[in-house]
Image (cartoon, coloured by chain):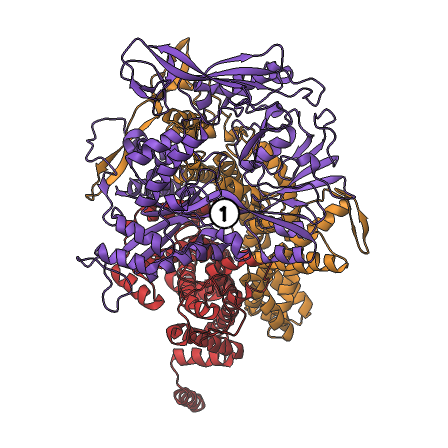
C-alpha cells in the first residue's frame, strides 16, 4: 500500500509538471497576449508606438525571453542572472532571449511564401537578467504579478478576492444538488416507468438541454423583476450583496451587506446551479441503480426475504454509487474553478468570471495560476476517487 | 432414458418452431419497450423532416430582410405568399426553415461525436479497468493530463492555425464529399464539420473512459467474470461479453445527456472561429444567438432548445430500450 | 511556421505521453526544443521576396472596389444592428468618409465621392472590370472562369455577425461571393496576427473616436506596415496616394484650423476616390439611468461622460451607483488606459481639460487653456543649428544634421545643409486654478506638476508612449503660481498644443517613490489621493469601488455624498438596472438599445440616452497580397 502511494505521488508530480509545461506552451502559442489591441489604438501626436516601445513592453512582460527560460522563471523563480560561484560569474553570455526579432518573407517547403522570424536584432543575455523582477516560482507558492486584470499587483490577491464567494456558491449548490439529486435518482429507479419517473426524466433532460443562461434569465424575470414591479415578494436580480439597503414585501427592511442581504442574493444563483446539477446527478444515480438492481446478488438478497428498503439502501445503493464517485470527486476542482455562465448572469464575483476575464484579457499569469491550482486539485481528486473505490467496494484493490 | 430423450426432442422441436436470429430477438425485445418505440418514431420523424428540409422549408436559410425584425409566428410574406411558421429572427430570417436545416448539421455532428467519444471512452476505460497495473496507470494519468489541459487556449490555437491555412489538416476527400452531401454544406464548412466532430470527440471521451473504468473495476471482481475466466474465456471475450454490456448503464446516461452538450458545444466552437458559422444555422448557434435577446424575449431559446431537448430525451429512451434489449440476463 | 508549431506541439504531447509510459525518466521539459526551432539567430536566410508588393489580383482594381462600395446599403446595415432607434437618428450615423458628417473637419458632400446604394451601378462596374455573370449563375466569374469570391474577416462579436450577414447578402445580390470568417478578437487584434500582419482581404473593425480626427498613421504612405520596418504604422491596407499622404501629414502638423480643414478635404477627396476602405457608420453610445436621476448630461464629443459627476443626484438617495461591466486593472492611468480606469480616475482626479461638443475648454481645476488667441501660447521663430533636437517634415524627432528636411518658419520644406535654419517653436504657459487641494488638505503645488512630468517621462514607470516627452525641449515649473511653461521642440506644430499633457501627482506623498515601483505601489494603483469631487474610500476587488465626498474639492460639495462603482457583467447589467441595484449604465456597458430598455422607459422606470459615438465601423480592403 505504501509503495502504491509513493508511486502514485510520483506519478502525480509528473503529470503536474507535464501539464504545466504543456499549458504554459499553449498559452504562449495562443493568439493574444499583453500586447493585443495595442496596435489597434489610433496613433496621434500624443500617442505613438515605435518599435522600441514594443520591445520595451515585451521586455516588461518577459516576452523577450525564450520560452524555457520564461517557464523556469515562472515555475521555480530561476534563473535570475549569471550563476555566481566563488566570486566568478558563469553563463553570463548565454543567450536567453531576443528583444527585437527580425521577420522576413521566405519560401517554405511547400513552395509558398511565408513570413518567418529569421533572426534577431538585439539579443538578451543571461547577465541582462540581473535586477529584473522575478517571482519566487509557482512551486514555492508565488503566483507572480498580474499582467492585465490587476496590473502589476500579485495574482494571489486577485484569487483570494474571488475564492470565498465561489466556494460559497458552488459548495452550497453542490451539496443541495447531491442531497436532492441522489434520492430523486433512487426513487426514479425504484419506481422505474412510473408517472413520477417519466415526469422527472423529462424535467432532467430539460435541465441538460436548455442552457444555463436560459434558466438564469427566466428565474431573474420570474422571481425578481416581475414580482418587484408588481410589489410582491422578490429576490435581488444579481450581485453578491447590495450597496444600498432595500425593502422587500413580507421580509421588510434589508440592510446592505447584512447576512439577510447576502442570503437573499445567494438564492437565485444557487437555485440555477442546483437545477442544472440535479438533473445530471439524478440521471446518473438512476442509471446505476437500475443496472445494479438487476444483478444476481440483489435477486439473492430479495430471495432471502430482506425488506425492499434494506435491499435498496444496503445492497444496491452502495454498488450504484461506485461510478458516481467519479463524478462527485470532480466537484473538488469545480469548487475552485467556479461556474462561468451563472456567475456572469448574476454578476457573482467568483472564480469562473475571473477565469474568463483572465483568458479574454490575456492575463496569462492569472490564467496559469488558475490552471495550475485546478490541475493540482484534479490529480488530488483522481487519487481520492481511487481511494474511495477501495473503501466502498473492498474487492477493488489498488495495485 | 426414453423419457429424457423425449424431453430432449420436445425441447428441440420447441426451439425449431420459434427459431429466430439474435437480431430478431433483440428487435422483439426492443419493440416491447413502448417508450423506446415512441422515441424511435419521434427521432425518425425528426430525421425525416431534416432530410427533406429543402422540400419542406418555405425559405432559404440565408434569405433575410432587415424590415422583418422579429416577425411574429405565422406572418405571411406579402410578396411571395410564404408563411413564417415560427416567425423570424432579428434580421428577418425564417426561424422554421433555419431550424429544420440546422437539425441536419447539429444531429449529424452530435451523433457522430457521441459515437466516437463513447467508443474511445469505452475502449480505454475497459482496458484500463480490466488490466490494471501499469496499463491502468499510464492510461489514467493520460486522462488526468488531458483533464488538466485548458481547452479554450488549445481551441484558440487550432482555430488561428485554421484561419491562416484551411488545408492545414488533411481530411480525405471522400469523407468531405460525403459530409458535404449529407449536410448540404460547402467544402470548407464540411471540413469544419469533420474537425468539430474530431475536437468534440477528442475532449468528450475522457468522462466516458473514467466511468467505464470505474464500473469495470467493480465488475472485474464479480463471480460471473470469474466464472467466464474459469471456463477459459479470453480477455477480449470477457471484456466484450461481460464487461461492456454490464457497464452500459452509466455510459448510456452519459451519452444521452452528452448529446445536448455536444450540440451546444459546437456553437461555442463557432464563437472561437472554427465552428460552422452563421449564415449556416445550427441548433447550437441559434441557441447562443438568442442569448442577447433573452431579457426582451425570454421564450426565444425555446425555439432551438426544444428540439435539442426532445432529441436528447428520445435518445435516452432509445438507450434504455437498447440496454434492456441487449441485456443477456433478461429472459423473455 | 504554424505547421512547424503544430508539429512541435504534437511532439510535445507525444513526448509527454512517452514520459508517462516510462513512469519516471527525465523531467527535461520538451519546450526548449520547440523554442530553439523557432528562433534561429542567424542572418543567412535569404530574403526571397519583399512581402506585400504584389497588387491584389481582384481588389487592386479600382472598379471592383467602387462596385463593393456601390453595392453596400449602409442604412440597412444600421437597421440590422440598431433596430430600435429612429430613422433620423440612423441617417445621422452613416459615414461616407473617415470623418463623421457633423464634424468640423468633414469635407462636405460636394467635395467627396459619395457611394450611395446603387447596385445597378455596382453591377455595371463589375461587368466593365471583366467580372461577368453567366446565365443562371449566382456569382460572377472572369475570363479565366475564376469566381469573384472574397474573404471577409472580422471578429465573432454578435454585433459584427449581424451586420456582416446583411452585407454578405448585399454583395451576393451584386454577384460577389463573400466568404465570412469570424475570428476570435484575440487573433484579429493580436500583436502578431490578424490586422497587425495584414492577414485579410476584406477586414472589418472600428477605429475608436478621439477628440481630434488625426489619421496620420492611418493614411500616410510611410505608415504602411511591412516585415522590413518591424510592422510599424497603421496603414494596413497599403494605400499610398501622394496627395493624400502629404495632406494628412499637413493636417496633423499645422495650427490653423482653416488650413487643417483644407488639408483634410484633400485627403477625403482622394480617400473616397480610391476607396481603400469602405466607411460604414458611427456606432451609437447608449446610456440608461434610473428615471429620477438628475444632472446626468452626456454631451456629444465628451471624452468622459462623468465630467460633471458632482452634479448627479437622485431624490431621497445618499448614494449613486454606477455599473461597470469591466473592472479597472489599476488607477495608474499612465500604464492602464482602459476607458473604465479613466472614468474611475476622473472622479478622484478630474482632467485638466474638458472636450464637450467637439470644443476644448478648461475644467474646474485649471485656468484658461493657453491658446495663441488668448496669449497663453506663443509660436516663436527660433534659429536652430546642427545637433539641435527638431521635428522633421515626417513628424519624427531627430537631431538636425545635413540631409534632414524640416519645415522652416515660413512654412517651406527645406533640406538642412549646415549653418542655421529658422523654425517655429511653441511655448505654452499652463496654470492650475486657485484653491485646488488634495483630500488631506495639502494644496496642489508646482512640485506636484513636476512629479507628474517626471514620472510620465521616465521609461522605468512602465508607460506606453513617450512621444510628448521626446517632443518637449524644456519645462519650467513656476514658483509664483501653480503651473509650468512648456517649450516644445522646434518644428512641433501639434494642433492640440493647448491641451495639458501630463498628470498631477501628490509630491508630498509619492515624491520619494522611484518610478520603477509606481505600478506596483497601492497608493498609486489602488487608492490615489484625490483632488476631485470624491475621494476613494475602499476598493473591494471584483465587487465595487466606494467613494465619499471630498470636503476639499474646489467645486464645492457634490450633490450626493456617496458614490459607488459597482462591477457587474455584460450579461447582468440590464437586469441589475431594472432591478434597481445600479442607477447608471453607460455606453461601455450597454451594447445598444434593447426592447427591455425601451419598454422600461415607456413604463417610466428608467431613462435612456442615445447619441452618435465617435467610434466608426469600416471595411478595409487589402490592396496587396503576401
Image coordinates for residue C471, horizontal then vertical, percent: 43, 19
**Camera-side residue of A278 and B119:** A278
Q: Residue at x 70, y 25 (%)?
A: C554
Image coordinates for residue A78, horizontal then vertical, percent: 45, 24
Number of callouts: 1
C317 above or below B59? Answer: above
Residue A354 shows in the view: yes
**For residue C393, which quarter of the picture?**
top left
Residue C29 shows in the view: no
Q: Which chain is purple?
A: C
Q: Which residue is mark 1?
A: C283
Q: Which chain is red?
A: B
**Left or right, B56 with reference to B165:** right
Image coordinates for residue C359, horizontal then vertical, percent: 54, 34
Image coordinates for residue C367, horizontal then vertical, percent: 61, 22
Q: Which chain is orange?
A: A
**Camera-side residue of C109 and C329:** C109
Circle 1 SS class: strand
Amino acid at each position: 500500500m505504501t509503495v502504491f502511494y509513493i508511486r502514485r505521488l510520483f506519478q502525480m508530480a509528473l503529470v503536474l509538471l507535464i501539464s504545466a509545461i504543456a499549458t504554459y506552451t499553449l498559452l504562449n502559442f495562443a493568439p493574444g497576449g499583453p500586447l493585443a489591441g495595442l496596435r489597434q489604438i489610433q496613433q496621434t501626436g500624443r500617442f505613438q508606438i515605435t518599435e522600441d516601445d514594443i520591445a520595451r513592453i515585451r521586455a516588461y512582460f518577459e516576452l523577450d525571453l525564450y520560452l524555457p527560460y520564461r517557464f523556469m522563471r515562472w515555475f521555480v523563480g530561476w534563473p535570475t542572472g549569471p550563476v555566481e560561484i566563488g566570486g566568478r560569474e558563469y553563463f553570463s553570455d548565454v543567450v536567453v532571449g531576443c528583444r527585437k526579432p527580425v521577420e522576413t518573407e521566405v519560401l517554405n517547403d511547400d513552395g509558398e511564401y511565408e513570413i518567418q522570424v529569421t533572426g534577431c536584432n538585439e539579443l538578451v543575455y543571461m547577465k541582462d537578467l540581473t535586477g529584473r523582477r522575478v517571482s519566487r516560482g509557482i512551486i514555492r507558492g508565488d503566483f507572480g504579478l498580474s499582467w492585465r486584470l490587476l496590473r502589476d499587483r500579485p495574482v494571489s490577491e486577485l484569487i483570494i478576492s474571488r475564492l470565498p464567494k465561489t466556494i460559497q456558491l458552488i459548495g452550497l449548490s453542490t451539496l443541495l444538488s447531491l442531497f436532492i439529486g441522489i434520492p430523486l435518482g433512487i426513487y426514479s429507479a425504484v419506481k422505474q416507468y412510473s408517472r413520477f419517473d417519466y415526469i422527472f426524466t423529462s424535467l432532467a433532460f430539460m435541465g441538460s438541454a436548455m442552457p444555463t443562461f436560459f434558466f438564469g434569465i427566466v428565474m431573474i424575470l420570474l422571481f425578481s423583476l416581475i414580482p418587484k414591479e408588481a410589489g410582491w415578494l422578490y429576490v435581488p436580480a444579481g450581485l453578491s450583496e447590495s450597496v444600498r439597503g432595500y425593502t422587500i414585501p413580507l421580509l421588510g427592511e434589508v440592510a446592505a451587506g447584512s447576512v439577510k442581504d447576502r442570503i437573499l442574493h445567494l438564492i437565485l444563483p444557487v437555485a440555477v446551479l442546483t437545477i442544472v446539477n440535479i438533473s445530471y446527478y439524478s440521471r446518473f444515480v438512476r442509471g446505476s441503480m437500475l443496472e445494479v438492481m438487476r444483478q444476481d446478488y440483489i435477486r439473492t438478497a430479495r430471495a432471502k426475504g430482506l425488506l425492499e428498503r434494506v435491499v435498496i439502501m444496503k445492497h444496491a445503493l452502495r454498488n450504484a454509487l461506485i461510478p458516481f464517485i467519479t463524478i462527485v470527486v470532480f466537484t473538488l476542482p469545480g469548487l475552485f474553478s467556479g461556474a462561468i455562465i451563472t456567475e456572469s448572469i448574476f454578476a457573482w464575483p467568483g472564480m469562473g468570471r475571473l477565469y474568463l476575464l483572465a483568458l479574454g484579457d490575456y492575463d496569462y499569469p492569472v490564467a496559469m495560476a488558475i490552471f495550475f491550482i485546478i490541475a493540482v486539485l484534479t490529480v488530488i481528486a483522481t487519487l481520492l476517487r481511487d481511494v474511495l473505490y477501495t473503501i466502498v467496494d473492498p474487492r477493488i484493490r489498488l495495485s | 432414458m426414453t423419457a429424457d430423450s423425449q424431453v430432449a426432442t420436445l425441447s428441440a422441436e420447441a426451439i425449431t418452431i420459434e427459431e429466430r436470429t439474435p437480431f430478431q430477438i433483440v428487435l422483439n425485445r426492443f419493440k416491447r419497450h413502448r417508450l423506446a418505440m415512441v422515441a424511435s418514431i419521434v427521432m425518425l420523424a425528426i430525421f425525416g423532416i431534416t432530410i427533406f428540409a429543402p422540400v419542406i422549408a418555405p425559405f432559404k436559410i440565408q434569405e433575410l430582410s432587415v424590415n422583418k425584425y422579429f416577425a411574429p409566428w405565422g406572418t405571411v410574406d406579402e410578396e411571395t405568399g410564404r408563411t413564417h411558421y415560427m416567425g423570424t429572427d432579428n434580421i428577418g430570417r425564417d426561424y422554421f426553415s433555419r431550424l429544420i436545416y440546422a437539425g441536419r448539421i447539429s444531429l449529424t455532428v452530435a451523433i457522430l461525436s457521441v459515437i466516437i467519444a463513447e467508443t474511445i471512452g469505452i475502449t480505454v476505460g475497459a482496458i484500463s479497468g480490466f488490466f490494471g497495473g501499469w496499463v491502468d496507470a499510464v492510461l489514467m494519468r493520460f486522462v488526468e493530463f488531458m483533464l488538466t489541459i485548458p481547452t479554450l487556449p488549445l481551441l484558440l490555437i487550432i482555430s488561428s492555425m485554421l484561419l491562416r491555412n484551411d488545408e492545414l489538416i488533411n481530411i480525405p476527400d471522400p469523407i468531405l464529399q460525403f459530409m458535404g452531401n449529407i449536410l448540404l454544406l460547402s467544402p470548407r464548412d464540411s471540413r469544419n464539420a469533420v474537425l468539430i466532430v474530431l475536437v468534440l470527440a477528442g475532449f468528450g471521451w475522457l468522462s466516458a473512459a473514467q466511468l467505464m473504468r470505474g464500473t469495470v473495476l467493480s465488475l472485474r471482481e464479480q463471480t460471473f467474470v470469474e466464472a467466464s475466466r474459469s471456463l477459459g474465456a479470453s480477455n477480449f471475450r470477457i471484456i466484450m461479453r461481460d464487461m461492456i454490456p454490464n457497464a452500459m448503464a452509466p455510459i448510456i446516461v452519459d451519452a444521452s445527456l452528452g448529446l445536448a452538450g455536444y450540440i451546444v458545444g459546437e456553437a461555442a466552437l463557432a464563437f472561437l472561429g472554427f465552428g460552422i458559422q452563421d449564415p449556416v444555422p445550427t441548433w447550437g448557434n441559434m441557441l447562443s444567438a438568442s442569448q442577447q435577446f433573452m431579457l426582451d424575449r425570454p421564450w426565444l431559446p425555446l425555439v432551438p432548445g426544444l428540439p435539442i431537448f426532445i432529441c436528447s430525451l428520445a435518445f435516452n429512451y432509445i438507450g434504455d430500450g437498447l440496454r434492456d434489449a441487449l441485456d443477456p440476463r433478461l429472459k423473455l | 511556421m504554424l505547421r512547424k508549431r503544430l508539429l512541435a506541439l504534437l511532439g510535445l504531447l507525444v513526448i509527454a505521453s512517452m514520459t508517462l509510459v516510462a513512469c519516471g525518466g527525465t523531467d527535461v521539459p520538451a519546450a526548449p526544443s520547440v523554442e530553439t526551432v523557432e528562433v534561429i539567430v542567424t542572418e543567412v536566410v535569404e530574403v526571397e521576396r519583399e512581402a506585400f508588393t504584389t497588387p491584389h489580383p481582384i481588389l487592386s482594381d479600382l472598379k471592383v472596389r467602387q462596385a463593393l462600395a456601390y453595392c453596400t446599403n449602409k442604412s440597412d446595415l444600421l437597421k440590422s444592428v440598431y433596430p430600435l432607434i429612429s430613422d433620423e437618428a440612423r441617417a445621422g450615423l452613416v459615414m461616407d468618409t473617415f470623418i463623421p458628417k457633423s464634424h468640423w473637419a468633414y469635407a462636405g458632400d460636394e467635395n467627396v465621392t459619395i457611394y450611395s446604394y446603387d447596385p445597378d451601378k455596382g453591377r455595371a462596374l463589375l461587368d466593365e472590370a471583366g467580372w461577368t455573370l453567366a446565365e443562371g449563375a449566382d456569382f460572377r466569374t472572369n475570363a479565366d472562369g475564376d469566381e469573384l469570391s472574397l474573404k471577409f474577416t472580422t471578429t465573432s462579436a454578435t454585433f459584427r455577425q449581424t451586420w456582416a450577414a446583411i452585407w454578405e447578402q448585399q454583395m451576393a445580390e451584386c454577384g460577389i461571393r463573400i466568404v465570412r470568417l469570424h475570428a476570435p478578437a484575440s487573433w484579429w487584434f493580436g500583436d502578431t496576427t490578424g490586422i497587425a500582419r495584414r492577414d485579410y482581404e476584406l477586414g472589418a473593425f472600428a477605429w475608436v473616436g478621439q477628440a481630434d480626427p488625426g489619421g496620420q498613421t492611418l493614411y500616410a504612405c510611410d505608415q504602411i506596415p511591412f516585415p522590413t520596418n518591424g510592422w510599424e504604422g497603421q496603414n494596413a491596407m497599403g494605400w499610398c496616394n501622394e496627395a493624400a499622404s502629404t495632406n494628412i501629414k499637413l493636417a496633423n502638423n499645422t495650427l490653423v484650423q482653416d488650413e487643417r480643414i483644407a488639408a483634410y478635404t484633400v485627403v477625403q477627396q482622394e480617400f473616397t476616390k480610391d476607396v481603400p476602405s469602405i466607411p460604414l457608420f458611427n456606432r451609437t453610445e447608449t446610456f440608461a439611468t434610473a428615471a429620477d436621476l438628475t444632472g446626468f448630461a452626456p454631451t456629444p464629443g465628451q471624452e468622459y461622460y462623468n465630467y460633471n459627476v458632482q452634479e448627479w443626484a437622485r431624490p431621497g438617495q445618499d448614494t449613486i451607483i454606477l455599473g461597470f461591466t469591466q473592472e479597472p486593472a489599476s488607477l495608474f492611468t499612465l500604464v492602464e488606459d482602459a476607458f473604465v480606469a479613466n472614468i474611475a480616475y476622473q472622479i478622484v482626479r478630474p482632467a485638466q481639460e474638458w472636450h464637450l461638443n467637439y470644443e476644448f475648454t478648461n475644467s474646474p481645476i485649471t485656468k484658461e487653456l493657453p491658446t495663441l488667441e488668448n496669449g497663453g501660447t506663443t509660436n516663436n521663430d527660433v534659429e536652430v543649428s546642427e545637433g539641435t533636437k527638431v521635428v522633421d517634415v515626417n513628424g519624427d524627432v531627430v537631431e538636425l544634421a545635413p540631409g534632414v528636411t524640416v519645415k522652416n518658419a515660413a512654412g517651406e520644406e527645406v533640406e538642412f545643409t549646415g549653418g542655421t535654419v529658422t523654425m517655429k517653436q511653441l511655448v505654452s504657459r499652463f496654470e492650475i486654478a486657485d484653491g485646488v487641494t488634495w483630500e488631506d488638505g495639502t494644496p496642489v503645488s508646482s512640485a506636484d506638476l513636476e512629479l507628474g512630468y517626471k514620472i510620465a517621462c521616465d521609461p522605468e514607470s512602465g508607460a506606453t508612449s513617450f512621444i510628448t516627452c521626446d517632443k518637449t525641449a524644456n519645462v519650467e515649473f513656476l514658483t509664483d503660481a501653480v503651473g509650468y511653461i512648456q517649450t516644445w521642440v522646434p518644428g512641433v506644430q501639434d494642433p492640440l498644443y493647448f491641451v495639458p499633457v501630463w498628470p498631477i501627482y501628490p509630491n508630498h506623498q509619492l515624491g520619494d517613490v522611484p518610478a520603477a515601483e509606481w505600478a506596483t505601489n497601492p497608493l498609486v494603483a489602488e487608492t490615489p489621493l484625490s483632488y476631485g469631487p470624491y475621494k476613494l474610500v475602499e476598493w473591494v476587488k471584483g465587487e465595487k469601488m466606494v467613494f465619499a465626498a471630498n470636503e476639499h474639492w474646489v467645486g464645492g460639495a457634490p450633490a450626493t455624498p456617496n458614490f459607488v462603482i459597482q462591477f457587474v457583467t455584460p450579461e447582468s447589467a440590464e437586469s441589475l438596472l431594472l432591478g434597481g441595484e445600479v442607477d447608471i449604465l453607460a455606453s461601455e456597458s450597454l451594447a445598444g438599445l434593447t426592447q427591455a430598455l425601451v419598454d422600461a422607459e415607456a413604463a417610466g422606470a428608467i431613462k435612456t440616452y442615445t447619441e452618435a459615438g465617435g467610434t466608426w465601423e469600416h471595411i478595409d480592403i487589402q490592396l496587396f497580397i503576401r
